[in-house]
Image: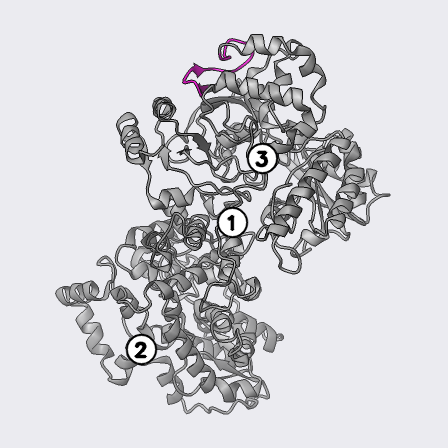
Amino acid sequence: MSDLGGVEAELRAAVRGEVDFSVTARALNTMDASNYRRVPLGVLAPRDAEDVAAALAVCRERGVPVVARGAGTSIAGQATGTGLVLDFTRHMNRIVSLDAESRTAVVQPGVICDSLRGAAAAHGLTFGPDPSTHNRCTLGGMIGNNSCGSHSVAWGTTADNVASLSVVSGAGARLAPGQGWSGAPEGLRPLVEGELELLRTGFPELPRRISGYALDALLPERDVDLARAFCGSEGTLGVVTEAVVRLVEAPRARALAVLGYADESAAAEAAAGLLPHGPLTVEGMAADLVRGTSGLPKGGAWLFVETGGASEGEARARAESIARAVSGDTVDSVVVTDPAGQRALWRVREDASGTATRMPDGSEAWPGWEDCAVPPARLGAYLRDFRGLLADHGLRGTPYGHFGDGCIHVRIDFDLMSEVGVRRFRRFSEDLAEVVVAHGGSLSGEHGDGQARAELLPKMYGAELVRLFERVKGVWDPADLLNPGMLVRPAPLDANLRFDPLPRKPVDVAFGYPQDGGDFSAAVRRCVGVAKCRTTSAGSGGGVMCPSFRATGEEQHSTRGRARLLHEMLAGEVVTDGWRSEEVRDALDLCLSCKGCRSDCPVGVDMATYKAEFLHHHYEGRRRPAAHYAMGWLPMWLRLASRTRTSGVANALARVGVLASLAKRVGGIAPEREIPRLAGETFRGWFWGRGASEDVGAGASGGPAVVLWPDTFTDYLSPGVGRAAVRVLEDAGLRPVVPPGDVCCGLTYVSTGQLDRARAVMRRTLERMGPLLDSGALLVVLEPSCAAALKTDLVELVGEGADGDARAAELAGRVRTFAEALEELAPEWSPPRIDREVVGQTHCHQHAVLGDGAERRLREKAGLEGELSGGCCGLAGNFGFEAGHYEVSVACAEEQLLPAVRGSVPEAEGGPVVLADGFSCRTQLEQLGEGARGRHLAEVLAEGLGER
């Protein structure tokens, strides 16, 4: 153990996969989605089973523990370890074969659940278990935890869907657990056959019994199902290298009945009664967990009951039948057959694992007692006792989950930062274990025991059966090599808490972090590891997070990975250089500051802000990268060019190859990029040339004046957007006014972490906006990124704290997008009918901060039909222009934006209108879009005005 260099060298010589003992690799793997943290020695990404066997041999010889890891979303701590972490997501992630006739598939452990389900869907099949993390969890992790998901009432747990396994045991044996004893390690059969009476009497019968080892599956009357017994062993017996899994027929159509009940108890009491109707799911949640009730029927709690059928009509009929059967008990109900509507409702449920980490008042809540299960008929009584126990301990939590299986999830507001709070955590855990057992339940109903509950298994199983668990572990893994401290001989449930090394006093920071009490450490703690940022596609509904992870597939370039590194930076044990850390800097380097995580992350992690904060401290008192001066100071350079009337000269020089290359090299700009042309006449120059007044009184038509924000991009680079907006606003009876003097939202300074300069710019802007603020006029911002900066960064940089400027919040409250201003101030105005299809992209900041409801409604009124893509264009302000970012920038654009416009008939020839309200999006299209020209919605409408 002491010769880490020797261990690393031996592993490199023994395997073909990547061996990484770097600070970054270790920091990324200190935690899973639990309350626990353990620092590994290093990480191996094995290429095949031979690599796994070779690595185990080295570790066995060296006495180095091994933990197998999939997506790292385990909630009980079993995906953390102090030795070697095996990361199966990089290479061992293939579907080896899929046989539709036998309804089986052969998969490697790193296969993502949704990848298998997608491949099976082509044959009308699916893999039954579907945890809420189904779009990022791996089959290996699901086997290790015996994962379930919302459809377990129909298709059972992972163990119910595994036919056989290929395993390397802790002793190094290559085994194939399946039916019968042939795949067992030597000594297991006589051990089990000597304890049959204990196995027949020691296990409670319930659908969600995940705790402990499932040794009752080895009873002769259960046909000695060794594969089933292995599932849920949490990587403590052997390492899975391949699995044969069973597939089930997928219903051709599905319907969702959402049943509203008066309260949680009523919903829990009703759940078991729905099972005879043969539903696919019976999920429950209460109102205090729901951010918005749009689409939900009336009620204080709901059951989500999914039905299937050969046709939409058949599925709907089954759902309606269930709704009618329980109508006397429900407050309200709704049946949804539209796939998009069902997805929207399911997202409410699936995001609960993250949403639940914040109480309604914003305080933190944590796992630890995440998924206890009881017989479904006892769920109502158990929940009442559970609520009572919470009250007795002065704790709060909101249960939700798999009501049809008697399994609930809950995050509780444990104080895990103080000794008093940790003692309460232990006392509550011990008391709740006794309540669960009294109801005939299992300490774990889905996520496994890990470190969170293994210590309490004697309460559930008794000392004799737990000793048998230890003996079974010894047969499979005599050296206790695999995931030691889990399930048997466990670590205490209050040891290794992830919060232990964090600073107890707030860190001195620039942003206000109003949602986290001004505490940067609390902001970083928001990331609980559910890893929604690790999905391989932005998903339906215009999602954005996390484009750099999807482009690279590297954990350090996910929102979670960056949060982990920031956590370790604050802890100071693995990442020891604090704000000067190069590991954190490199991980944040590919963050596009798209802000997608601010809205798409279930717990609202805002990595764009954290990045700006880090860069501010990292370069404090030091020379910055050239790009920070070239593009961070862009408003100043453009203003200088305009005032010296050298825009034309700059454009001409930028087209001279040698000079352009030199300028890009000096400015830290990617050589592959073209430098955008500066406008010959600024928007403000054009506006004032019209003889416009600065008076914000009513216009000649009696309509109100609006302040049109002259953002840097519109003013100097695309003034046509501003001119078009003026024309449309005036047609709607409004009178645009442009602020006098130079104003700036500070966006480019924020995105490059130059926060002192950003503050100065913002404060100067507030001074100059004073008279317009006094008028009460709304502020129309055409560039989404600038609107987002004014609504968020402005307030959090200069509006918070003892010396905060109240005008910041006032100005932020006045900000409206172009469509919002028209909808609010000219509701009777009718836009020109364009009647064309649209393609393009919703700006990532619009999605994350502003919302696009008004834009959708305006497009609909104008006859602009079609959905804009999600994701991020990849240019993202300065990001895509910076040297070293070009390939990732292009990869991001290729995800959704470029495919959306590629191959379309040109607009001039009757093709779709390409909409892109952001300057970055339009520039990316111009440089990569093969002739596609993106336009702001204002430009399209202004052109339409000329035709009516």
Is 172 included in the stretch rendered in magenta?
A: yes
Numbered tag placed on residue 636 in the rendering: 2
What is the basis of the colouring in this image?
A: one colour
The amino acid marked with disc number 2 is Met
User: How crowded is the residue under tag 2: few (<14 C-alpha within 10 Å), some, or many (20+)?
Assistant: few
Magenta residues, as a range? 167-185
Numbered tag placed on residue 130 in the rendering: 3
* Circles 2 and 1 in contact, beta carbons < 8 Å: no
Quadrant housing residue 446: top right
Return the residue nearer the eye: 33 or 899. 33
Q: Is residue 814 above or below residue 664?
A: below
Q: Residue 133 location, x and y as percent?
A: 54, 40
| Nearer mark to the viewer, of 2 and 1 | 1
Describe the element under mark 2 as helix, strand or loop.
helix
Dot placed on the residue nearer the N-terminal end, 3 or 1: 3
Dot placed on the residue nearer the N-terminal end, 2 or 1: 1
**Which residue bears the numbered disc 1?**
500
Quadrant housing residue 214: top right
